Amino acid sequence: MTDDLELTVRRRRIVELVSATGFARVAELSRELGVSEVTVRSDLAVLERHEVVDRVHGGAVIRGLASRAETPFEQARSTSAEEKQRIGRAAAALVESGTSVLLDVGTTPAAVADALLEREDLDDVVIITNGLSIALALEPAIPRFTVVVTGGTLRPLQHSLVAPYASLLLGSVRADLAFIGCTGVDAVAGVTNVNLPETELKQAMLAAADRAVVVADASKLGRTSLGVIGGLDRFELLITATPAGGSDTHLEELARLELAGLSTRTT
């Protein structure tokens, strides 16, 4: 009876710790509770079966945390659409024939894909993506483009492919350039994303590219999300766009990012 009580108390404490910050690592839970990481993983498996938490790489989040904060791809694509088109064209202008590109999932990277498709001067370009919508958008450019899809587990909101398996391909390539989307770019927190499984893939893309460019519309600047993709020093450039009507806040955030060491380009 005592063992059952300790088990119940420990699992309740795990839920409290995960709830406090939205995400908790297995190692942190192990130290806090004074039990092994194997025990923590076993508890998390039970809590996941009871639909209390979702296990993610390295830890756990409260069930549904990521999806509650996300907007479906089709809905997000219509938001700031003209800004994203300008960002896409500026990003696509960085690509040269004979190069390899990692193209992240999301509506702003999708705008990059659209702009790449318009560049009939490009040839022998390899594009690797974990976005099914992006891969299908690029299909008309074959055989000028070679389109490689990472594989993995399908997430319906963004039509994205995530772990397991999606990161295996990224660990075996070295690309010239990566375009990475996000839900937040902040002078202190760096480049962040609301969804943890997709954050893991963005981190893998960042590690697999010689150069990385973050593409983000004005609404993302100054915002932070749960998953950290990387510090500003990991990115060569931010490409963004001036919002309709201009914005003093946008200019202030750009100045903070520049002061923190991130080069920016506004379209």
Image (tube, helix red, strand yellow):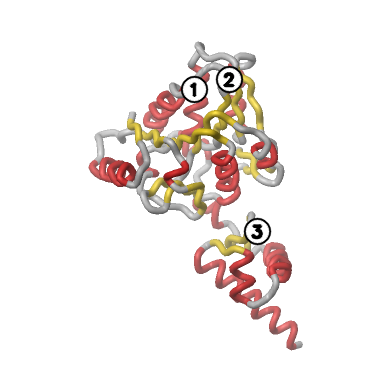
Front disc: 1 or 3: 1
| Residue contact between numbered discs 1 and 2, judged by CB atoms under 8 Å | yes
Q: Residue at x 56, y 67 (%)?
A: 18
- Front-most of residues 237 and 51: 237
Compare residues 78 and 176 and report the one nearer the observer: 176
Q: Position of residue 43 (x, y in %)?
A: 70, 69
**Residue that protrudes farthest toward the left in the picture:** 248
Picture coordinates of residue 41, whole percent (x, y): 70, 65
Is disc 2 surrounded by few (<14), some (14 to 19) or many (20+) residues within 10 Å? many
Camera-nearest residue between 113 and 126: 126
- Tell me the kind of residue under disc 3: Arg
- Cα distance between the residues tagged 1 and 3: 37 Å
Density class for disc 3 (Cα within 10 Å; few <14, some 14-19, many ≥20) is: many
The earlier-in-sequence mark between 3 and 2 is 3
Q: CA distance from mark 1 to mark 2?
A: 9 Å
Q: Find residue 6 and report its horizontal and vertical position in percent.
A: 69, 83
Residue 10 position, x and y percent, is: 65, 77
Residue at left offset 34%, top offset 47%: 260
Amino acid type for the residue under numbered disc 1:
Val
Q: Please name the residue that numbered disc 1 is placed on.
A: 95
Residue behind mark 3: 55
> Mark 3 against mark 2, which lies toward the viewer?
2
Q: Which residue is mark 2?
A: 125
Which quarter of the figure is the N terminus placed in?
bottom right
Q: Quadrant of residue 125?
A: top right
**In the visual, does 226 lie left or right of 3?**
left
Left or right side of 13 for 255: left
Residue 58's place in the image compared with 185, above or below, is below
Instruction: Look at the numbered disc 2 and give the secondary structure of its residue.
Output: strand
- What residue is shown at x 52% (from left), y 30% (from top)? 177
Q: Residue at x 60, y 34 (%)?
A: 131
- Mark before the other along the chain sequence, 1 or 3: 3
